[in-house]
Amino acid sequence: MVTAIETPTPSGSDAADVTVGDLLAAAVAARPDSPAVSDRAGTWTYAELDAYSRAFAAWLDARGVRRGERVLARVGNTRQFVAMLFGTLRHGAVFVPVNPAMKSFHLKSVTADSDPVLVIGQGEDTALLAGLTDRPVRELGALWAEVEALLGTGRDAAGPVVSPDDLGLLIYTSGSTSAPKAVVSPHRPIVFAARAIQAVLGYRPDDVVLVAIPLSFDYGLYQVFLSVIAGAQVVLTEPDRHLRLLSTLHDHGVTIVPVVPSLAEMLLRLAGRDKRTAAVRLFTNTGAALTAPVIEALRRTFPAAQVSPMFGTTECKRITVLTPDGDLAKPGSVGPALPGTEVMILDEDGRALPPGEIGEIAVRGPHVMAGYWRAPEITAQRFRPDPVTGEVTLHTGDYGHMDTDGHVYFQGRRDDLFKRRGVRMSSLEIESAALDIEGVEAAAAIPPGDGFDLTLFAVTSLDPNEVVERLKDRLEDAKVPAECRVLDALPLTPNGKTDRRALRGRLTDEAA
Amino acid sequence: MAHEWDERFASLLTAVLPPSARDAGLTPDLDLKKAGLDSLATIELLVSLEDEYGVEFPEEVLTGATFATPAALWRVLSAQGAGRAEAGPLAA
């Protein structure tokens, strides 16, 4: 019986001693004059990106920033972000990207926790940052003039030797209950994960990758690494330009679009009023899963495009990738383990479960990051070394099952799993059944709580009782919601996921 | 209080705002972003306005400024030949 599937390492990805900077160096050597990154203001070639990253490293050096020290950047999707990313890592320092949409409450904790030697803000936001930290805060536009002055001065030639085991990134993840915590990402697992993802997705040198997702999220950030490995071009855009997404696709000849559900919805609505044929050949998805109707609509609207659902967690970047259009044969799956890594489904005692049974998704391999920043207790809970071999198993806290081919089906966080009338179920399976009903556009199932029973919130033109009736054809009795409520739209979190807490809050308030 | 816009505009705009903003009512200079008009809602509003008024927003007005306030949005919509702009030079 197969309970854990190990996929072979892709050839040529024996990433023993490669740093993130080496990835860029290889692209610069291979195609210095090819476009590397574009934003609303223009485009840099690989040679230009390299030159700016060197100048930024020299600028950090002049500020006295040393190896291992943190540089926090709260900057939108701009070319400067990409140059600062590579420049900081080239200098041996640690880049800490923070989402411009993060509110002061969390921002204050992140600026303290990351213990940065330098904080970089953008525009008016810089004053807010200065009010939250006692560390030096610089405004991007002002410092960039100083960086440009260092271009080609020769002061950017040498730098410290960076080891693959040096820390490269601190990526903050939104803890749903507690303060944000940072995943410690050394160069080695970053490079391994990026190369392994690329081995499945196959970005090409002529690809143009649209990054509309914030670069401060690892899904957006790794698009830069994937693109550099392939020698492709990244096109950066920001929320205030989303109305023009279709023109951005056409103007740049975009071929790959990583999407979260809200972005996919936007593209589909805009495509309804703009009939030009887009060159998109691949949509990837992670963060929150696209529903089957949305995947279908993407294929209908962008006939040249394949779809690749993926699944991951910042703690190891990527867990599974389904090959492009793999969902046609394996609907609902997020794919098999990333090449060269292992995925297991474990019961509550940490024993591997047979195919088909729901358990915690656990991961082993060279992509597992180095724990949480300055948080030994939660690191010990989630990153568990084998008592004999020392190999770390990452317990993701995500639940799902695996089929006999090693394809993973995600079911939700531990909180999304619950028992009703003695039957174990997940919100996700109820939502999937609801979305299977013609006329239901979106759905969120909230488990029973104090004073309320299992409730489905749905965006639909159907009568709510009709939705419940049709669910009875699709789900066993215990899984049929007691009630369906119709909404104009589901509330979303800033990450574009359904805001379940807000929905649960409504039910709790009514019951109180 | 009467506004410069018509009922259809008011109802399409309030439909995409969160319930809290709906109850507060529309004023000409309401900050729509602060009221909860996110990217997806903005695009839904664009599509519903174009359908309802039979107009097409040209690329150059697809900006944050157009959707900043009800008054700004109504001005741009009217300039495309919708609503009270029938008296204007752009009337189709």
Image (cartoon, coloured by chain):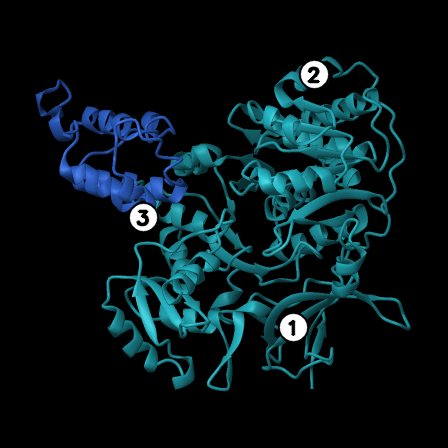
Chain A drawing hue:
cyan
Horizontally, is A478 left or right of B23 in the view?
Answer: right
Disc 2: which residue: A148
- Hey, what amino acid is under mark 2? Glu
Q: Using the rendered view, name the quadrant where residue B12 is placed.
A: top left
Q: Helix, strand, or loop for circle 3?
A: helix
Q: Helix, strand, or loop for circle 2?
A: helix
Q: Using the rendered view, name the quadrant where residue A18 is placed.
A: top right
Q: Using the rendered view, name the quadrant where residue A77 is placed.
A: top right
Residue that appears at 35% across and 76% down = A482
Distance, label 3 to label 2, CA atoms, is: 48 Å
Q: Quadrant of the C terminus of chain A?
A: bottom left
Q: Which mark is residue B19?
A: 3
- Spot occupied by residue B9 in the image (x, y as percentages of width and height): 19, 37
Callout in the foreground (1, 2): 1
Q: Which mark is residue A360?
A: 1
Instruction: Answer few, some or many: residues within 10 Å of disc 3's Cα (few below 14, many 20 plus, some between 14 and 19).
Output: few
- Hey, what amino acid is under mark 1? Glu
- Does the rendering let one see residue A412? no
